[in-house]
């Protein structure tokens, strides 16, 4: 039995590089030789034991790679073709998928997120892709691995914050938190036609990057009260759309307080513990507010569109990759990324 | 100065019939001689001091009446014409109204609700209608006052629960609470094409009425666990749309627990105190859930459509009027209605 | 090699019952033993040579039947289970399907319509279902074959006319032509909340059935001018939504003439020859009109919803089946149906 | 009686500068002293007698100016304030406006277009604004007249082509014709997130400007077949959205031929004569195509959003103004503009 190196969740607090069997390919599946991948904030939640996965699970859900083997019934692709696969791998054929709820595949909450969660992931030399016909997305020549590395998750998630917020031309938008997801939400808000984009964080470097990606106004919440500032910039009216990109009570609540009556709170964060809705900011439920949550959209049509954005040059996310590691060094990469050291935004991992 | 009888908010705990001046008509306004009106749950909140209005304010926001006088610039109407006016009276000309947020007129939360809140209301012999061109809605001959009495508020609000929930043909829908608003939400869900309508309440009479209006399955929450029942009726999948029609933590939370991944919680209730989002039912923010709140839609186009529903015979709400009072007896009416005595659903008040 | 009886397109003007091999089941496919099927207006177009299919093709796209064999990778179903399959059989996994254009599967116009068009159909003892996971829809016990026989095509198509027309509560809607599709559009318009439904045809029996399904006003165009009548019933304003259910210049144009500014023309018909847009009725392109066309929606989620409508009793289409034939008599059935003899609306064919 | 200079439609072929009375201000109205205005393609249609207006009508519908007088009931504005008013002046209070069909105000086709059509327009020293509360839009200091001169019509119209086309992130879009409206549609398509924008025209200068505004691929239809080129650039799939910005059979039909199944044809042109739908490109009505027409959106909320776009620097339209004239020279301006001489795109007229 052939083996490969893979980053495995051992127990809360420990992800380790281990030898694991190279997966066998069944009908409708594809085996991808991973050329570049990355670590997500969600992986850190897994590392810390805050999001439960089975011990022994290979982690990672953002693969760029080469098709190594195709299962029965997978047509229209060639061995050796370079592809990405979204973090969410919908089947396309269940009731939920056919009803456009691809991320909730199978009718289970978060059912479309399989890689590094309910099946083995891609922080490894090889990854097995389920429902390959719906998920393998060719990468055009001329785009590097790193150029498309953000597509599988953070670009898809961040953009969806802008899309689910139904941003219209001329909207004023605030994004709370400018980590990788928040930065992509900023880029997405600009791409959707928002004309005043306000971002809130406390890390100077991130606020600088956010300006490059479209932020018009940056607020350092450690220096000034963001709600007060937002109201000043909106003549006291509040924003049309508030995007939550962290997953805390504080940012969720601030979004609601920043919102105009009739506005949309588009939530991307992963919440834990308790979450409360301040009734005053919620106008007692009479403010025509909308709160929408979105899990990273997946499937090859989504990936195709995101690659098209990159290819057009409309958005350039390569400067989000601040550090590079080989797969052998992935434990170091986790150490750096999970502690947000050295101004890290995203890391590239190359097996 | 001519006077009229009117129900006035005196202080928390006291609404009294008083003599008040008949209002003068300014440009763009109209004076309506009220022929029938009713009491709303919100009026009871005002009575109890739970929703603050200025002492001296005439209460009531659901008028049926006759045009008595028209202000400068109000054209296309005749003195003596029978009309209704929605509880929400949008101006139609501010930034919010022109952006389709009629209920948040002026960009203020709940800004479109004026009657019996920020201006005098219609539990009186006469009521002054602001922005008359946008709000006076003729009632066709052949429809009685009582037939259209639910249009200004509860029918508009209840239906909006179904509309904001974006109910599609073939949806399964649950409505928590079957008071007047919830009953109208049930009728609205049927009208929008829901094919399995589940309702939850504990008052037998209301559950019976809900069956007449479209409920397929009624659950008495005092006898059985509603979430368990709902899951049984949906093969464990949850509902497509859950409508909250009461305004409590319990019903709000139950709506979320009843919802499928990707489902919509359409909230109509008026909340006070604290409101929390159970993170487990909320799938940590990753379930593609939507929470939408809607304040009673107003304006004459809305009223015209609701009258059209009544006229078509598709929905018959007359049996919601369980008790009748003259304006002179309005204090008795409040006593009955606020204590939900004698199986009251709605009362008709005739000045 | 086992054989079966099947209705085969021989040449323009001739569909004949022939012996054909029973299909072999490949990966992802399923073989259905057909228990009931029907003839569609489109089949008549094929018979007449107006819609080209390959000689030798088995015709028919509306199957009710029993699962006879399941291919590799088809899970969650049992041999012997009763199912329907939509006329349109999307793969669920191509770019178009993942972008919610299921009927244009593969990115080809009309690409989702395979049965009796690009692959063999179901007017036969057996039919091979492609992409079985996305298309096999269980039929609940208690519903007869005939009760669900309209789901695969005409109910799905007719309802989509109402859905694509974005009918709102209180809309006035006209449907031109009350053949099987038009009758289902009438039922769909009612189910979506239209409160004034006007239908136009010249066959008395069909106008009678349309009243049972929801029509408020029926116009016999052989006796009166429909546009004049429609304007009379809408105070000269025109309708909110006009549904075209025949496929002629006359009905298409009448829809446009019946429409209010800002209205939606929802087109279901199959057009041939020339089609022109009368510039006057089109307000020179400045009337905010929308013209939307919809091919029968398919896939098992769609079928599940339609079955739910039938099961709820909201709509009863069984009286559309006016005649019954065995598969052996299918040539007679075509003769009757294509000449619209004996008041036929739909026929049931039982192999 | 005070008089002013104004460009008046005399008869087909003749627009002349005349002395006309300065209008009197009624309730709800405002008198604007025009500081800058422009000529629209529609004005040329009027000049040529192709669009009928009453002889004696003052022409022009794109005003920038100063508030000179406010009628009774117009509040929240000051004399001397600089404003723009959209070409379309909705009342905000009729059934159509309250149903979000602002351009079809009063339920009449094109009913919202009043200036220089059904009431006197703004190619004059003063213009009377109806429904001032809904239409006067303050211009922020720091923006010149010419910077906001495109907002009232061509920017609003062009952008609406992108909006009604429901352009999504990653869409491929073609715009046929790159006159002022088409150029703004190009800018709008970029602002909405289209990542491949193809434009078609035959005037080199316009194709150059279109590149500045967002076009990725320019096609000179006098040198190459546009449909062939478009198919080459879309791998034979066709575009997601095709915007028609001229108003001819040729461009309308080309849009349809360029469209993918399921695509949207967003039409902005003013058609005359005959318009036909090629049944082959229309997939016989089965391609899930949508054809949507949009009249220039108006009202102060729309204008506010467009000003916000200008102010943000996202789009710069000042280089569309290629020529400048005083009001006294307006007949020369018409001569230049209507003959498209000297590379004119738009002219600025200053009374």
Image (cartoon, coloured by chain):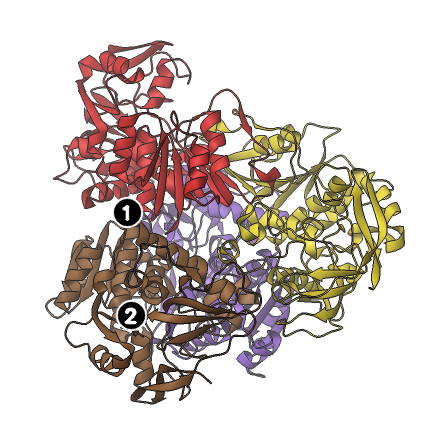
Chain colours: A yellow, B red, C brown, D purple
Q: Which residue is mark 1?
A: C170
In the image, residue D229 above or below residue B213: below
Q: Which of the two labelled residues, at mark 2 and mark 1, occupies the earlier sequence position?
A: 1
Count of labels in the image: 2
* Residue A41, percent from left and from top: 74, 43
The residue lying at 19 percent from left, 17 percent from top is B327
Q: Quadrant of the N terminus of chain B?
A: top left
Chain under label 2? C
In the image, residue B124 above or below residue B180: above
Disc 2 + disc 1, Cβ < 8 Å? no
Residue C252 numbered mark, or none: 2
* Residue C104, percent from left and from top: 48, 69
Category of crowding for the residue at label 2, using alpha-carbon neighbours closer than 10 angstroms: few (below 14), some (14–19), many (at least 20): many
The residue lying at 40 percent from left, 63 percent from top is C83
Residue C127 numbered mark, or none: none
Category of crowding for the residue at label 1, using alpha-carbon neighbours closer than 10 angstroms: few (below 14), some (14–19), many (at least 20): many
Chain under label 1? C
In this rendering, does residue B20 appear at all?
A: no
Relative depth, front residue between C237 and C347? C347
- CA distance for labels 2 and 1: 24 Å
Q: Is residue C28 left or right of residue D217?
A: left
Relative depth, front residue between B126 and B252? B252
In this rendering, does residue B160 appear at all?
A: yes
Q: Secondary structure at mark 2?
A: helix
């Amino acid at each position: 039995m052939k083996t490969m190196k893979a980053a495995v969740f051992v127990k809360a607090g420990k992800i380790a590089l281990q030898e694991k069997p190279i997966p066998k390919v069944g009908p409708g599946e594809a085996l991808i030789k991973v050329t570049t991948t990355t670590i997500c904030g969600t992986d850190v939640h897994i590392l810390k034991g805050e999001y439960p996965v089975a011990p022994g699970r290979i982690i990672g859900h953002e693969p760029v790679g080469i098709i190594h083997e195709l299962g029965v019934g997978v047509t229209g692709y060639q061995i050796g073709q370079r592809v990405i696969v979204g973090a969410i791998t919908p089947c396309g054929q269940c009731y939920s998928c056919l009803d456009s709820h691809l991320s909730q595949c199978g009718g289970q909450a978060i059912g479309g997120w399989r890689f590094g969660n309910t099946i083995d992931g891609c922080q490894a030399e090889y990854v097995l892709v389920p429902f390959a016909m719906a998920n393998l997305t060719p990468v055009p020549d001329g785009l590097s691995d790193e150029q498309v590395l953000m597509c599988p998750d953070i670009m898809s998630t961040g953009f969806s914050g802008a899309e689910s917020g139904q941003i219209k031309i001329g909207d004023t938008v605030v994004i709370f938190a400018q980590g990788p997801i928040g930065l992509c939400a900023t880029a997405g808000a600009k791409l959707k036609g928002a004309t005043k984009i306000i971002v809130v964080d406390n890390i100077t470097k991130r606020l600088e990057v956010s300006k490059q990606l479209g932020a018009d106004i940056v607020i350092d919440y450690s220096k000034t009260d963001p709600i007060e500032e937002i109201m000043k910039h909106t003549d006291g009216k509040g924003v049309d759309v508030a995007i939550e990109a962290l997953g805390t009570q504080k940012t969720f609540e601030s979004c609601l307080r920043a919102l105009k009556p009739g506005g949309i709170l588009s939530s991307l964060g992963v919440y834990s513990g308790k979450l409360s809705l301040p009734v005053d900011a919620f106008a007692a439920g009479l403010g025509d507010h909308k709160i929408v949550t979105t899990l990273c959209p997946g499937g090859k049509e989504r990936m195709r569109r995101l690659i098209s954005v990159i290819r057009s040059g409309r958005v350039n996310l390569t400067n989000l990759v601040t550090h590079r590691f080989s797969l052998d060094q992935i434990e170091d990469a986790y150490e750096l990324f999970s502690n947000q050291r050295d101004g890290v935004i995203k890391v590239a991992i190359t097996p």
